Image: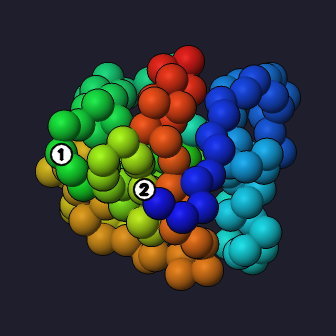
Amino acid sequence: MGLVNKMAVVTMKSEYCKVEHHTIVIDGTPLDLLLHNYYPSNNLLGMIPTIIDWVYDLKEKECIKGRFNSASKEVVLPLLMCPDDCDLSCTVIVANVIKAEGYIIWKQVGIDMSTREDMLLGCEGIGSKVHWLDKIPQMTFEEEQYSSHLRKI
């Protein structure tokens, strides 16, 4: 396997949150800042992980947990959400996640484009329509390190 990225989950403040919260950091850079660096006009700075306890809708929370814990070899995983609403109906960043022989690969990262009609079906609609952010490189993580950090949240 070529380049292996390092993921960490750290507690820090983000652009629009006055309180510290868990933040996904890739190779030393918070994920929202990494996305902003590639797409500065897309308003992605300040987005927060979907895996913190700020998601108030129980069905959405269970859906997110289900995708994180999925046994599937490939899943579209909600990663970041807007800190204003803390739900899956505003801007959501997703990753096309592939599990392969001890590695977790984020093949693509994109903006979920689900419509309100898609969301009426429940959170299953999340990831059914995605605007992939082609400038974001594929990221590869060691499964053990990846899982141990995400368990902190």
Per the rendering, the mark at residue 92 is: none
Query: At which x and y percent is residue 86?
Result: 53, 37
24 relative to 139 in the view: left or right? right
Residue at 19%, 37% (x, y): give it.
71
Mark 2 secondary-structure assignment? strand
Residue on which the image places disc 2: 105
Q: Which residue is situated farthest in the front direction here? A: 1
Residue at 43%, 38% (x, y): give it.
143
121 relative to 53 in the view: left or right? left
Q: CA distance from mark 2 to mark 1?
A: 13 Å
Q: Which residue is situated farthest in the bottom direction here? A: 134
Q: Is residue 52 visible?
A: no
Please tell me whether residue 34 is drawn above or below residue 148 in the rendered image: below
42 relative to 33 in the view: left or right? left
Query: At which x and y percent is residue 4?
Result: 58, 54
Residue at 23%, 37% (x, y): give it.
70
Marker count (numbered): 2
Residue on which the image places disc 1: 72
Closer to the camera, 120 or 93? 93
Residue at 73%, 49% (x, y): give it.
27
Q: Quadrant of the C terminus?
A: top right
Of the residues shown, which amino acid type is indicated by label 1? Ser
What is the crowding at mark 1: few (fewer than 14 residues within 10 Å), some, or many (at least 20)? few
Query: At which x and y percent is residue 38?
Result: 72, 74
The answer to whether mark 2 and mark 1 are in CB contact below 8 A is no
